[in-house]
Amino acid sequence: MSDFSPPPAPAGPTDFIRDIVASDRTAGKHARIVTRFPPEPNGYLHIGHAKSICLNFGIAHENGGQCNLRMDDTNPTKEEVQYVEAIQTDVRWLIEGWADDALGMKPKGAQPTTTTINGLTDIHLAAAPALIPNADAVEPFFASDYFDALYLCAERLIERGHAYVCDLSPADTERLRGSPDRPGEDSPFRSRSVSENLALFREMRAGKHPDSSRTLRARIDMTSPNVWLRDPILYRIRHAEHHHTGNAWCIYPMYDFAHCISDYIEGVTHSICTLEFEVHRPLYDWILTHLELPRPLPHQYEFARLNLTYTVMSKRKLLQLVKEGVVTGWDDPRLPTLSGLRRRGVTARALRDFSTGIGVTKYNALTDVAVLDKAVRDDLNRTALRRFAVLDPVRIVLTNIPEGETIPCNAINNPEDPASGTRVVALTREVWIEQDDFMEVPPPKYFRLRPGGEVRLKYACIIQCQEVVKDASGKVVEIRCVADLSTRTGEANSGKKVKGTIHWVSASEGIEAEVRLYDRLFTEPEPGKDGRDFLTVLNPDSLRCVRARLEPSLGTAVVGQQFQFERLGYFYPDLDSQPGQPVFNRTIALKDAWAKANS
RNA sequence: UGCCCGAUGGUGUAACGGUAGCACAGCAGACUCUGGAUCUGUUUGUCAUGGUUCAAAUCCAUGUCGGGCAGCCA
């Protein structure tokens, strides 16, 4: 471990995996810490992946190492390029400005090279130097780039008597495997000769056998209490086109065979995955050990995947929601996908803060979505520009302000960030306020407008309600008030206290917009908990669209800008916006102590 | 009923044989030109039973409960 001296581990988050990494470094076990994030490109990344990304990239970043982005694409029937693209976008978005320095990619088109070290065959593929300016020069790692290497490893195992070609049908394979509490039985093809196995395997590769007619299996122990050691299948025949290798192959390696070798090829030191792979670890180690490889072997560690209340996380269920049109697509803002969260206005920073905040353990936890909400509000509170918007308008007429007159009012853009400055909003004779901010017969402790009552129009002045105009059905259609201009912000009586301050939008100056109000997708904390179909607990009100009135400055808002609509919540321009027809998504509502106390 | 893993307030997470802490949620109050933010206070916890030890959330044993594993998925 010579001259390499990564930065000392910062006093950031720690957990049992970081502890292992730290002690491995102290022991000088690795020249450089290498982790990997290996999604299968068969769906979109979700917030559970964010936890894994933050763990893997975080460890790499903190230790001056690297985290390889790798497409775990060994099953041609499930994977698609569209997912490869989306995954890259999401990963880059999530780590941008935080762990870019640790992103392990490879030079475009690079393939592993085979060499001999100490008489042992080695296969290796290094990452491209970090932060290559031209992003087109690099691409993610692909397990499918290792198909040649993997095939070589398979032949190696066969030659050493560690693997054999098995002609059992899928049904018979399953039958002879036994069950967790009943040992399996040897396949009748288990003791074929090396040369016969080799010949057969080569025929498989050459396409001489139909799908499922044969497999390559590891020769381990059919009576092992660990079912994954009962001669697991290493290769299966699939005459199918692969998104990355086309029709070059008709045999494809299984996860267990491909994953450990891929880790080795890339020089991964810590291979971090979720708990369900714990029982696969002996197989991971068995394969690498029996390959007799010259470099240090990677090690697998497992942590608990993220579970969040009021949502679903499995790719299968997310795919179902998308396919059945329950939501509008993978980036529907109600989904916990990274693209959905991003479209809703959730920032990468909030996701990272959330991910590190929840910790890393082996306990199968269910995290309250309120923790996510808090992380989102905390980040947006610091950064979002404050604006006025009225979602459910009722008309106020300020009877003492002449038609056509505009009274400029200075409004603070973000009280949490003085550097964001101020803007001017115009007070006019007619303004919109929220229906909610007026009550004819208010309950006790109601601070807002009531007949005869006073309220402050924020950044403008205090108004007093003098008359309520209703339509035939008794609905309030107009509230006539008088404005006390001497209480204008900055004027003599501006210090006058009233209980309530409300937001407003000029009727003549304001613009209209569609605002999409999102709520949780499910009505139950654990959708599908008791074996019920998760689709039976969909929240019918997960999306409500309203026509809102906005202050004019919002007309030029573009995707990427975060806003707080004062007293309402955080809102984010949607990509459905058209010139003159803005659309905003509600990222998250503000906390509302009043509403809560009255619910 | 085989093997593997886990269990700390309502939720999540620290404490690595030496005072059980933090965050979220909740509750109460202060402040407020956002019923937001901020600030203050506060309710609630080591799965059980034994053992080792001056001392156990921590080590050991047994039990209980929860999760995972029998795809030619990952």
Image (cartoon, grey):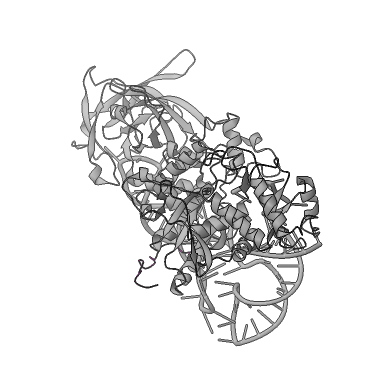
Magenta region, main secondary structure: loop
Q: Inspect this view and state whether residue A510 appears.
A: yes
Residue at image coords 67%, 46%: A204
Tell me: A285 left or right of A108: right
Tell me: A210 left or right of A499: right
Residue at image coords 44%, 63%: A33
Viewer-nearest residue: A575 or A199 = A199
**Image vertical order of residue A307 relative to residue A191, above or below:** above
Placement of the N terminus of chain A among the 4 image quadrants:
bottom left
Span shown in magenta: A1-14
Q: Inspect this view and state whether residue A275 appears.
A: no
**Image vertical order of residue A315 relative to residue A260, above or below:** above
Viewer-nearest residue: A511 or A259 = A259
Residue A575, image quadrant: top left
Viewer-nearest residue: A155 or A216 = A155
Viewer-nearest residue: A521 or A92 = A92
Magenta region includes residue A13 = yes
Image coordinates of residue A401 in percent, x first then y, are: 24, 21
**Image vertical order of residue B5 relative to residue A507, above or below:** below
Image coordinates of residue A393 in percent, x first then y, are: 40, 24
Residue A59, image quadrant: bottom left
Image coordinates of residue A22 in percent, x first then y, are: 45, 69
Residue at image coords 39%, 35%: A572
Image coordinates of residue A144 in percent, x first then y, are: 53, 47
Tell me: A47 left or right of A97: right
Magenta region includes residue A345 = no
